[in-house]
Amino acid sequence: MTPSDLPEDLRQKAAHTVSQLRAAVAEYQDVTYANSLGAESMVLTDLIWREVPQIDVFTIDTGRLFPETYDLIERIQRKYQRGMRIFYPDGSQVEGWVARTHINGFRDSLEDRQACCGIRKIQPFRRALAGKAAWVTGIRKGQSASRALASPVEWDAEYGLHKISPMLDWSENDVWTYIRNLHLPYNSLHDSGFPSIGCAPCTRAIQPGEDARSGRWWWERSDSRECGLHPRRKAPALVAAPAMGD
Ligand code: SF4
């Protein structure tokens, strides 16, 4: 089955996403996709490798991922017969941080958690974006109040390049209809109540009706639950915006 066999409304959404990706390549040339290995990432990876292969695809192995996530990476590589560049944290920085705290020191304080995310995610992410003109993310407006404020093309001042979000208007149902109709690989943890999957010690299943981000860093206040790849936005109506693609 191919995207042309999807229901008409979803086929149009997929075509719109592809047109935004092509426009990004035309405008910025050197575009990279930060694959978070979530459900949206399976759709975007499929669309990019089918339709816009000029965009390179990378992911980050923090060293604390679920076994199911490593299994997913292997299944993606086998299905598409393509390599996804994998970036890793700097080993000496991980060693230093663990020596200063302890192996699960990210639970001790928000500062310790953000330091761990900084070493294991943000620094590899910065290396992956170095020299790029734009990066692509699979965030959707429906994922959180903060993400509802996102625009398809934004200047990412934090990382100094453009940020392309071509799936903002996709619903969760759209994502899963695409995945199931096209028999795409996905993380098996999604079948066990994990809507958003990051590092194993910082992700848990959620109950029906809970915010999709509530299974991430659940011991923190809801307004601190972003990893730093997608900084939170402030809006007058949002006193405490729940906190991303990852
Ligand atoms: S999600 Fe948890 S284990 Fe992963 S980098 Fe952040 S704090 Fe560290």
Image (tube, grey):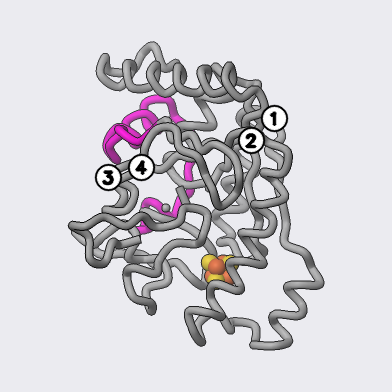
* Magenta span contains residue 171: yes
Measuring 53% from the left and 17% from the top, which residue is drawn there?
Answer: 22
Could you tell me residue 244's position as x and y percent? 42, 53
Closest to the camera, between mark 4 and mark 1, is 4
Neighbours of disc 1 within 10 Å: few (<14), some (14-19), many (20+): few
* Magenta span contains residue 17: no
Mark before the other along the chain sequence, 4 or 1: 1
Could you tell me residue 84's position as x and y percent? 68, 38
Q: Which residues are magenta?
A: 167-194
Measuring 54% from the left and 48% from the top, which residue is drawn there?
Answer: 157
Q: Give the labeled residue for mark 1.
A: 82
Instruction: From the viewer's perspective, tell me whether residue 132 is left or right of residue 13.
Output: right
Closest to the camera, between mark 2 and mark 4, is 4
Question: Would you identify the image quadrant in which residue 132 lies?
Answer: top right
Q: Which mark is residue 142?
A: 3
Question: Rounded to the nearest whole Å, what is the CA distance between mark 3 and mark 1?
Answer: 30 Å
Question: Rounded to the nearest whole Å, what is the CA distance between mark 2 and mark 1?
Answer: 10 Å
- Identify the amino acid type marked 1: Arg
Question: Rounded to the nearest whole Å, what is the CA distance between mark 4 and mark 1?
Answer: 30 Å
- Identify the amino acid type marked 2: Val
Q: Give the labeled residue for mark 4.
A: 150
Q: Quadrant of ligand 1?
A: bottom right
